[in-house]
Image (cartoon, helix red, strand yellow):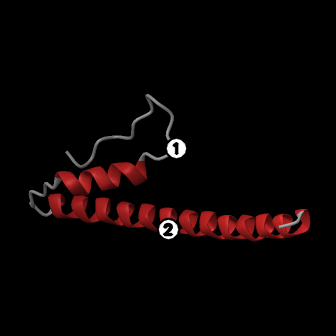
Amino acid sequence: MDVEELRMKLLELSKKEASLNFKMYELFNENMTLAIRLAGYIAENRMLGGNWSNEEAVKVMDKYLTAGRKEGHRPKEVHQ
């Protein structure tokens, strides 16, 4: 392969990477929205007298609701 072919291949791979990064961003935002909705449903259930507890769901919600948060700035614990 000559230099020009390598540049074209690099450009092609860079486009694919950008596309995948954007898709990952979209999916993360969608998951964060779903985590917020789930937290709302849990709060509503508890207000109506339910007793919901699922550690796996709590871990998933925490993953999306605390992403990018600075260390030591935890949100109010509403699911415990």
What residue is drawn where x is 63% and y is 66%?
Answer: 22
Residue 2 percent across, percent down from the top left: 88, 65
Which one is nearer the viewer's eye here, 9 or 70? 9
Quarter of the C terminus within the rendering? top left
Q: Nearer the viewer, mark 2 or mark 1?
A: 2
Image disc number at residue 68: 1
Residue 19 percent across, percent down from the top left: 66, 70
Extreme residue in the top direction: 72
Image disc number at residue 1: none
For label 2, the residue is 27
Q: Residue type at mark 2?
A: Leu
In this view, 67 is above or below 7? above
Mark 2 crowdedness (10 Å alpha carbons): few <14, some 14-19, many ≥20: few
Upstream in the sequence, badge 2 or badge 1? 2
Secondary element at tag 1: loop
C-alpha distance separating marks 2 and 1:
16 Å
Quarter of image, res 42: bottom left
Residue 13 percent across, percent down from the top left: 71, 67
In this view, 26 is above or below 62? below
Q: Residue type at mark 1?
A: Gly
Which one is nearer the viewer's eye here, 12 or 31? 12
Secondary element at tag 2: helix
